[in-house]
Each structure stands twice: as C-alpha cells, then as structure tokens.
C-alpha cells in the first residue's frame, strides 16, 4: 500500500495568494474564461450552471456579463464580475439585472468584498425569494504555476430564508398592532380622556401615566390570543414599587368590589416591577373578526379599573 501521509520533513509546496491580474489582465478576459470554465465556479458553489449568453444587453442598453441556467434546479441566473473591491454601483447592477431579467439566481464575483456588501447580500437572501451569491476570485501560485481560487462569502441557505420569513411575520404583526391600537383609541377616547395624548404604536402594549407617580402606568395589553388591562408599577426603586403594590394589595377587597371582579396581583418575584392585571378576553390580535368586541371589553375594563384604583394610587405618598 502506498504511503500518502505527509511526513514532518517532507517539502510541502507553499501556496502564494495573488490578485486575479496574475492570470487575466482585464476583467473582460476573466469573464471570457469563466464562460468557458463555468464548472470551476460550480465546484465551489455546488451548482450546475451552464452559460446561455455572454454580455447580454438589457432593454435600456446595459450589459450583463453572463446569463446562466442551473440545470438541476431549472432556474435562470445572472453573473456580474468585478475586478476590484465591491462597490454600490455593482451591487445596484446585480439587483437591477436580476429584476429586469426575472432571474432566480444572481452571482457577484469580486476581487475583494466590503463588509457592508457582504451584509447587503445576506439581507437580500433573507428578504427575497431569489438566491444571491457573493464570491471572491483570486489566484494561487504553487511551484510557479497559477490557478484560480473561488471562495464563497455569502450564499443562500434555508436558515437565511427562515430568518426572512420570521422578519416578514414580525412586520405583519407590528402593522396589525398599530391598526388595533388605532381602533381601540377611538373607542377609548370616546369614553374618557386618560389616553387622549397617546398615539398608536407597533407593539403589544399601550401605556399612560396619569397616576401621579412616576413609573406607574395604566396599560392596555394585546397578544395573539389574549387581551387585558393592568397597572404596571416600575419606578426607579424596587423597594418603592413593593410599597406601592402592598398599599394597594391591602385594599384588594374594596378595589375588586368597585371594579366588579377579581384582579391578578403579581409581585413578580426576582424582578423590580410589580403589576395588577385583568385579562378581559381569551382571544386577541389574530382574531380580527373579534376586534370590535375585544376593544370594547378592554376599554370598559380600563374605565372601571381607573375608577377603582386611581384615587387610591394618588393617595400613596
């Protein structure tokens, strides 16, 4: 059996990294070479590109370096080559050309990628249904012979697409929250003035002071499957918060009698804040057809809540 291991005293050739200009004098020469040797890029990316067109003209006169087809995935793509550091101009071309030709894949081959462009390609993979690749090209000299070396810097992945989907879901939820609060505030402001100065927000809660104590706020709450109101107690001092909470808790029977039902008294152990809460609905943001009923119940609860607890909070010194 032949011994193929590397021995400690074996003379291993040293690889010297160089710029692409060590092989190709101009960017056009590299593009022509890549046209004829697309498999070298396929080996690096795990793709099955074949070149269908070189230097294809766009309808407005711009020129795409290479148009390709991924035979395994049955997807069309473009390749933009750049013999220099990545720049905004070529990033713009990559996006514009992929859109103009309805390409599913876009590959950007550069000599040196800038950090902001790496992040931009990553964002494109997370935010669109297209596949974007950022790849570096350099040459390696070994024993006096030069060879091209492709290195993937940013590539599409299922994880990136999942992140994009999660961000889209989060964005949709924030828009729903803002719409929910806009509708609720109209109802709330028709009943009393406590939230008159508050604007809709893209979040799951809407708070207003009005208690006379800093850090103590009346709060509307909305989640996917529940809705409620609360008094959130979070001054700068945990000791002060407990004092306020205990002073109100000592009057729990009277407060709950005036409110009309039991409240959830939460001291929140190991946390600075405390809260007094009432869940008013077991449906929430995802049940849009129930919004009107939920909002009415929330506003009614907040009116009763402030009436029952407001004077007592203000009396705490």
Image: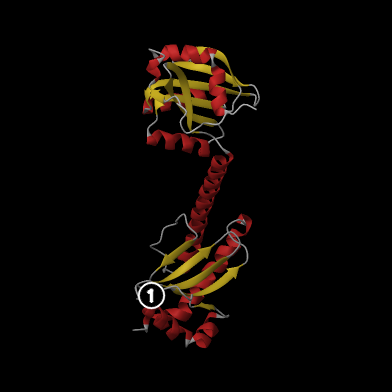
x and y percent of residue 196 in the render? Answer: 40, 64
x and y percent of residue 238 in the render? Answer: 38, 76
Instruction: Please tell me which residue is depicted at 52% across the width and 21% down the height of the picture.
Output: 78
Q: How many marks?
A: 1
| 238, 287: nearer the viewer | 238
On the question of residue 80 being in view, the answer is yes
Instruction: Please tell me which residue is depicted at 38% across the width and 36% down the height of the picture.
Output: 116
> Which quadrant, please, contains the N terminus?
top right
Instruction: Please tell me which residue is depicted at 48% across the width and 62% down the height of the picture.
Output: 205
| 186, 176: nearer the viewer | 176
On the question of residue 101 being in view, the answer is no
Q: In the figure, residue 15 lies in which quadrant?
A: top left
Q: Is residue 120 above or below residue 77?
A: below
> Which quadrant, please, contains the C terminus?
bottom left
Instruction: Please tell me which residue is depicted at 61% across the width and 23% down the height of the picture.
Output: 48
x and y percent of residue 291 in the render? Answer: 59, 59
Q: Is residue 99 above or below residue 184?
A: above
Q: In the figure, residue 112 lies in which quadrant?
A: top left
x and y percent of residue 151 in the render? Answer: 48, 29
| 113, 246: nearer the viewer | 113
Q: In the image, is 273 to the left or to the right of 263? A: left
Residue topped by disc 1: 211
Helix, strand or loop at disc 1? loop
């Amino acid at each position: 059996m032949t011994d193929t291991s590397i021995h400690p005293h074996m003379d291993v050739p040293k690889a010297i990294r160089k710029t692409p200009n060590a092989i190709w004098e101009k960017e056009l020469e590299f593009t022509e070479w890549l046209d004829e040797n697309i498999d070298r890029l396929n080996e690096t990316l795990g793709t099955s590109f074949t070149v269908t067109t070189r230097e294809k003209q766009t309808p407005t006169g711009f020129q795409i370096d290479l148009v390709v087809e991924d035979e395994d995935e049955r997807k069309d793509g473009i390749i933009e080559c750049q013999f220099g550091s990545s720049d905004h101009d070529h990033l713009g071309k990559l996006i514009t050309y992929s859109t103009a030709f309805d390409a599913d894949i876009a590959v950007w081959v550069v000599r040196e990628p800038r950090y902001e462009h790496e992040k931009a390609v990553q964002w494109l993979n997370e935010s669109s249904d297209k596949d974007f690749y950022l790849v570096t090209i350099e040459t390696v000299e070994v024993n006096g012979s030069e060879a091209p070396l492709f290195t993937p810097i940013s590539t599409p992945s299922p994880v990136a697409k999942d992140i994009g989907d999660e961000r889209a879901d989060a964005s949709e939820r924030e828009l729903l929250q803002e719409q929910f609060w806009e509708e609720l505030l109209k109802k709330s402001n028709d009943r009393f003035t406590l939230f008159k100065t508050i604007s809709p927000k893209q979040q799951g809660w809407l708070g207003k002071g009005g208690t006379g104590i800093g850090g103590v706020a009346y709060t509307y709450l909305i989640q996917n499957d529940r809705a409620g109101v609360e008094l959130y107690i979070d001054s700068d001092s945990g000791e002060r918060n407990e004092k306020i909470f205990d002073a109100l808790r000592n009057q729990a029977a009277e407060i709950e009698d005036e409110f009309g039902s039991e409240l959830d008294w939460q001291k929140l152990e190991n946390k600075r804040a405390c809260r007094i809460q009432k869940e008013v609905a077991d449906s929430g943001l995802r049940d849009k057809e129930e919004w009107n009923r939920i909002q009415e119940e929330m506003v009614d609860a907040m009116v009763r809540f402030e009436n029952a607890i407001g004077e007592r909070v203000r009396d705490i010194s």
